Image (tube, rainbow, N blue to C red):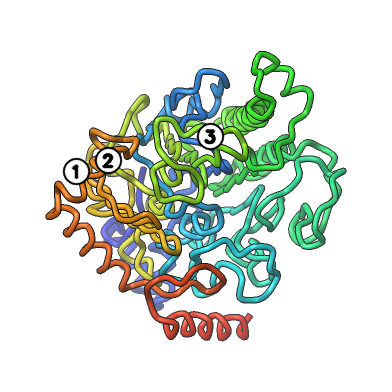
Amino acid sequence: MARLESGDVSRREFLKLVGAGSAGLIASQLLPTDAFADERPNILVIVADDLGYADLGIQGCKDVPTPNIDSIGRNGVRFTNGYVPCPVCSPTRAGLQTGRYQQRFGHEFNPGNNPGPNFGLPLTEITIANRLKKAGYATGLVGKWHLGFAPEFHPLKRGYDEFFGFLGGAHSYFFKDPQPVNNAILRGTEPVTEDTYLTDAFAREAVAFIKKHAGHPFFLMLCFNAIHTPMQATEKYLRRFRHISDPKRQTMAAMLSAMDDAVGDVLNALRSANIYDNTLIFFISDNGGPTAANASRNDPLSGYKGQVLEGGIRVPFLMQWRKRIPAGKTYDYPVIALDIHPTCVAAAGIDLGRLGGKPLDGVDLLPYVTGKKNGPPHEHLFWRYGTQSAVRSGRWKLVRMQDGTRLFDLETDIAEQRDLYKERPSIAHELEQAFEKWNSQLIQPLWSGRPAAGTARAANRVARRQQRVRQRL
């Protein structure tokens, strides 16, 4: 893939730019342009909701076939140690959008259904859509947002050209069910009546977006609410799993199968448009499975959604770009959803060293999966969710929960069953120090949740900056 950066400008092009006598013009010429559109990838990020670590065929699931989702990993990379930055939905999405630990800007908890002006992804943060739109990409979001109800938080105000979906944290899959006034299905900003099973509707809209923009680089974030509650499926999908005796697992299987069909429709749209090979695709879940709520499975991990144990934060994480990434690769070093933002931006030909704004915590994964860089992308990964916290470095993971602090060797104990805190005090101390250093950079949550270490003054500064941004809108 050609990347148009300062070092790539030819002498003739440079003289032409200098002759223009405009620093702004030079800067604009260093970004990708239509002349390079056919060399830049399309970008598709697919986010599942509450999908367990073991709920895909490629992850070992035996009772629910998921051939279309599995194909993303089989045609590219499966990350065996793929994480999200939070064990619940909205904070993970905030980190995914920004490429930054969401606790840095106070988005530590779900904002609930509060429509207020302070309950959403802070306006001081730059989204992946902001950056790709500026680089000339058509940008679209289909599905679940969950990053604020107030008008200034709407996807169309956060870098997306098009939006079809809902703003809240959950939604019925059938229009006939009553919905809160502030959680309608929207096309742009206008409520619509949607008679199609919602997973199928999101597939339809994603396919339409691809067809519309197939001739020019696009960025599409497709955020399913499957397999989040309420547990609802159509007879078409339920019929496939009559052999599953547990009613909840049967419905979950039907919902997952519907999502797999939807992903298949989207992949086929890429093939039909002859852009499949040059589309960078990610598939990820927003957190681990809430096993009791939706019959998902996190085997062999311990814990579940809402916990910083592996079952709450380690998720299916797949990546494909047939033009650049060898097929059938398994990558075992720990990576995190924060890496998706810089990877997409770099793939679009934008120099990460010249982004501006606040530093990213994620890294570009492309050099690692293509073999240009060796070793782990991250020295440490961190989590803070109220009173829970964790840090991972290599094989070691330190976990703090209400029942105390524990140390695990994930290389030999993926299920986190043997506490080595007292046996390996030096490792535990090193991880505690690393966490405290990171934690000292964070602020208090901007809305309700248990207090975390930090300063209220820092949170107030974010709120004041956000108010100044809002006044300029």
* Residue contact between numbered discs 2 and 1, judged by CB atoms under 8 Å: yes
Front disc: 1 or 3 = 1
Q: Amino acid at mark 3?
A: Ile
2 or 3: mark nearer the eye: 2
Q: CA distance from mark 1 to mark 3?
A: 32 Å
Name the residue at 27% across, 35% down: 413
The answer for how far apart the CA atoms under marks 2 and 3 are is 30 Å
Instruction: State the residue at coordinates (77%, 52%).
Output: 185
Q: Residues within 10 Å of mark 3 (few under 14, many from 20)?
A: some
Which amino acid, mark 2?
Answer: Tyr
Q: Secondary structure at mark 2?
A: loop
Q: Which image quarter: residue 86?
A: bottom left
Within 10 Å of disc 2 (Cα), the crowding (few <14, some 14-19, many 20+) is some
Residue under label 2: 333
Depth check: 367 or 247 in front?
247
Q: Residue furthest front?
A: 403
Q: Which residue is mark 3?
A: 275
Q: Does any portion of residue 153 appear in the rendered image?
A: yes
Residue 75 numbered mark, or none: none
Q: Residue 144 in the image: x percent, y percent?
A: 65, 51
Residue reaching furthest to the top = 243
Disc tally is: 3
**Which residue is farthest left?**
426
Q: Which residue is mark 1?
A: 375
* Residue 26 visible to an observer of this rendering: no
Q: Is residue 352 left or right of residue 94?
A: left
Q: Along the horizontal axis of the image, is 276 left or right of 24?
A: right
